[in-house]
Image (tube, helix red, strand yellow):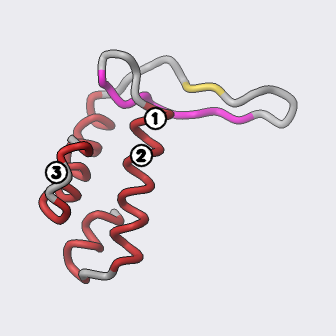
C-alpha cells in the first residue's frame, strides 16, 4: 500500500515506509526459496516465529509492491 501511495502522491514519507516495509518483509518473512511466508506469530512468553507455510497470493502481493517500489526508485536491490 505504501508503495502505491508513494507512486500516486510522490510523498517521501510513503516512499520511506515502502522501503522499510520491503526490507522488513525480505529480512523476516521471506523463506530461503524466496517466497513470502504467510505470517509471523508473537506470543507474550515465547519468542516470535514465522509461520512455516507459504501462500502464493502473499508472494504475488510482494512482487506487485516491489515492482512499484522499483519503478519509483530504480533501486535493483529491492528486486
Q: How far apart are marks 2 and 1 (CA)?
A: 6 Å
User: Which circle marks residue 8 in the picture?
Assistant: none
Which residue in the structure is indicated by mark 2? 23
Q: Residue 77: percent from the left, percent from the top?
A: 25, 43
> Residue 7 lies in what quarter of the image?
bottom left
User: Mark 1 packing: few (<14 Cα in 10 Å), some, or many (20+)?
Assistant: few
Which residue in the structure is indicated by mark 3? 67
Q: Which of marks 3 and 2 is nearer the N terminus?
A: 2
Q: How far apart are marks 1 and 3 (CA)?
A: 18 Å
Q: How far apart are marks 3 and 2 (CA)?
A: 14 Å
Q: Residue 69: percent from the left, percent from the top?
A: 23, 58
Which residue in the structure is indicated by mark 1? 27
The quadrant of the picture occupied by the N terminus is bottom left
User: Mark 3 packing: few (<14 Cα in 10 Å), some, or many (20+)?
Assistant: some
- 75 left or right of 19? left
Q: Is residue 7 above or below residue 30?
A: below
Amino acid at each position: 500500500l505504501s508503495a502505491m501511495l508513494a507512486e500516486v502522491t510522490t510523498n517521501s514519507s510513503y516512499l520511506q515506509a515502502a522501503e522499510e516495509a520491503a526490507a522488513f518483509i525480505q529480512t523476516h518473512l521471506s523463506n530461503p526459496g524466496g517466497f513470502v511466508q504467510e505470517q509471523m506469530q508473537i506470543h507474550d512468553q515465547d519468542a516470535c516465529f514465522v509461520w512455516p507455510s507459504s501462500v502464493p497470493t502473499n508472494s504475488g502481493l510482494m512482487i506487485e509492491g516491489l515492482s512499484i517500489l522499483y519503478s519509483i526508485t530504480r533501486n535493483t536491490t529491492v528486486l
